[in-house]
Image: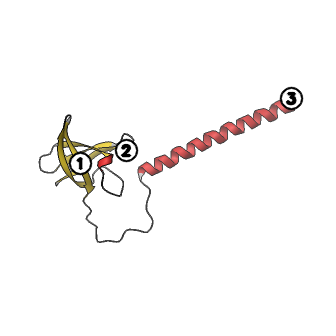
Amino acid sequence: MAKGIIKRYAFRKGFGFIVDDKSGDELFFHKSEWQGDGPIRQGIEVKFVARESEKGFQAESVSPLNKTANKKKPVEKKLSIEERVSSLESAVSVWKAVSILSFVGFVIVAVNIFI
């Protein structure tokens, strides 16, 4: 397996690029190839299998090089950026719905007062 570092990753698009340690080449990878259980972030050291595709080299079976494998994992899992964004988007959707319902209620009360 080859080793490298994640150069950049667009979590909304679900893909990124890894720089190979030996050759310095950039390899495309998709989030479906991520074998780790944590978030995908820029700067993480990874190991992967390089394959040539129609569009160039691509990384498969991408997994983080975990230097702290012997340490116990914390009991509380921190939320990844993807989970935080998803939570924020849900909160904004709820806020919009409550705002619309409040406005409709206000209009109904105003109409009843003036009629």
How far is mark 3 from mark 1, CA to CA? 68 Å
Instruction: Name the residue at 37% across, 44% down.
Output: 11
How far is mark 3 from mark 2, CA to CA? 52 Å
Point out residue 6 in the picture as x, y percentages from the top left corner: 26, 49
Instruction: Name the residue at 70% across, 38% down.
Output: 101
Residue that carries the numbered disc 3 in the rendered image? 114
Q: Secondary structure at mark 2?
A: loop
Point out residue 99 in the picture as x, y percentages from the top left corner: 66, 39
Q: Secondary structure at mark 3?
A: helix
| Mark 1 surroundings: few (<14), some (14-19) or many (≥20) residues within 10 A | many
Q: Are marks 3 and 2 in contact (CB under 8 Å)?
A: no
Instruction: Name the residue at 61% across, 39% down.
Output: 96
Query: Which of disc 2 and disc 3 is earlier in sequence?
Result: 2
Instruction: Name the residue at 43% across, 60% down.
Output: 78
Query: Which of disc 2 and disc 1 is earlier in sequence?
Result: 2
Q: Quadrant of residue 17?
A: top left
| Mark 2 surroundings: few (<14), some (14-19) or many (≥20) residues within 10 A | some
Q: Amino acid at mark 1?
A: Glu
* Badge number at residue 90: none
The quadrant of the image that shows the C terminus is top right
Q: Quadrant of residue 47?
A: bottom left
Tell which tag, 1 or 2, sits nearer the viewer. 1
Q: Is residue 66 above or below residue 110?
A: below
Q: Amino acid at mark 3?
A: Phe
| Mark 3 surroundings: few (<14), some (14-19) or many (≥20) residues within 10 A | few
The answer to whether 24 appears left or right of 106 in the picture is left
* Badge number at residue 11: 2
Q: Secondary structure at mark 1?
A: strand
Q: Residue furthest top?
A: 115
Residue that carries the numbered disc 1 in the rendered image? 60
The answer to whether 69 appears left or right of 57 in the picture is right
Q: Residue furthest left?
A: 23
